[in-house]
Amino acid sequence: ENLHSDILCEFLNTKGKHGEGARFLKLFIKLINDLANGKVSVNEEDFENAEAIREKVNKIDILISNGKKAIIIENKINNAGDMHRQLPRYNEQVTFNNIEVVAIVYLPLDQYKTPDQTDWNDGEKVAIEDKLVILKAFNGGNDYYSWVEKATKNAEKCNNKEILNQYSKLIKKMGNQIMGDNKLNELNDMFLTDNGKCLFESYSKLKEVIETELPKRRAKILCDEFTNRGF
């Protein structure tokens, strides 16, 4: 995840070397709010001068903070597993410093991956759920890839535009690969069911008809047609 977190952190940092202030962060906050559908509402003005930092606060992937409010980002683009009580611990560590966590963004590549809650207590589940936004890396809709695309189009500096453009291609390639793998797994699971076996048998019979019977029938039709025409 280091590459992805490094790139994301740099462009979300209003004081980053990209030199375009809060331009990219505002696009990201809009995406979070759209995905949250009212559950989370982040005020972009609160983060106008916010700093994004990498793993400096108790190993949190990315922490975006203005000193009073914060957004936690946990990057799982490489599909790493969750550590023990990972999101509850991060939430506790930030709020312990009197900083309000307004959103926790969980960023997986696999569209079916969600936070592991098996070691969370009921209170933690409620506390995290109220702030949690699952941002899929690539699913053809409001995803991380769409933010990279919009950031590319909105970038003013050529260097930023080129870096983001190349990065969007990487995300798309990775997303297509995982979606292809998921489809193959779904197909495999389907064929393991009784229904799937019936479908497979039907498909096999249809394939046999297409490959053997249809050519014979087509040949007969052609022969009859040629005969009728006096050839």
Image (spheres, rainbow, N blue to C red):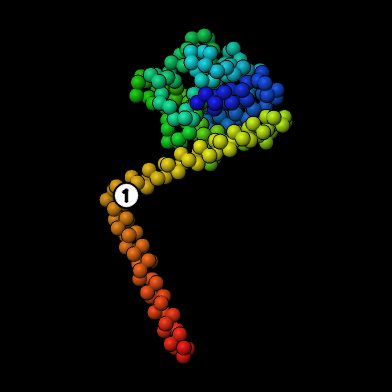
Total marks placed: 1
Q: Note whether 205 is above or below 182 in the view shown.
A: below
Q: Note whether 226 is above or below 181 in the view shown.
A: below
Towards the viewer: 92 or 202:
202
The residue shown at (40%, 45%) is 184
Residue marked by disc 1: 191
Q: Residue furthest bottom?
A: 230
Circle 1 sits in a helix, a strand or a loop, which is it?
helix
The residue shown at (69%, 30%) is 159
Towards the viewer: 195 or 69:
195
Q: Residue 2: where, in percent of width, then height?
A: 52, 24
Label 1: few (<14), some (14–19) or many (≥20) C-alpha neighbours in 10 Å: some
Q: Residue furthest front?
A: 231
Q: Note whether 19 is above or below 177 in the view shown.
A: above
Q: Residue 94: where, in percent of width, then height?
A: 50, 13
Q: Residue 124: where, in percent of width, then height?
A: 40, 19
In this picture, residue 119 sits left or right of residue 93: left
Q: Residue furthest top?
A: 97
Q: Is residue 82 visible?
A: yes
Q: Residue 6: where, in percent of width, then height?
A: 57, 23
Q: Is residue 151 visible?
A: no
The residue shown at (53%, 41%) is 140
In this picture, residue 225 sits left or right of residue 35: left
What is the three-letter code of the residue carrying label 1? Phe
In this picture, residue 62 sits left or right of residue 85: right
The residue shown at (59%, 12%) is 67
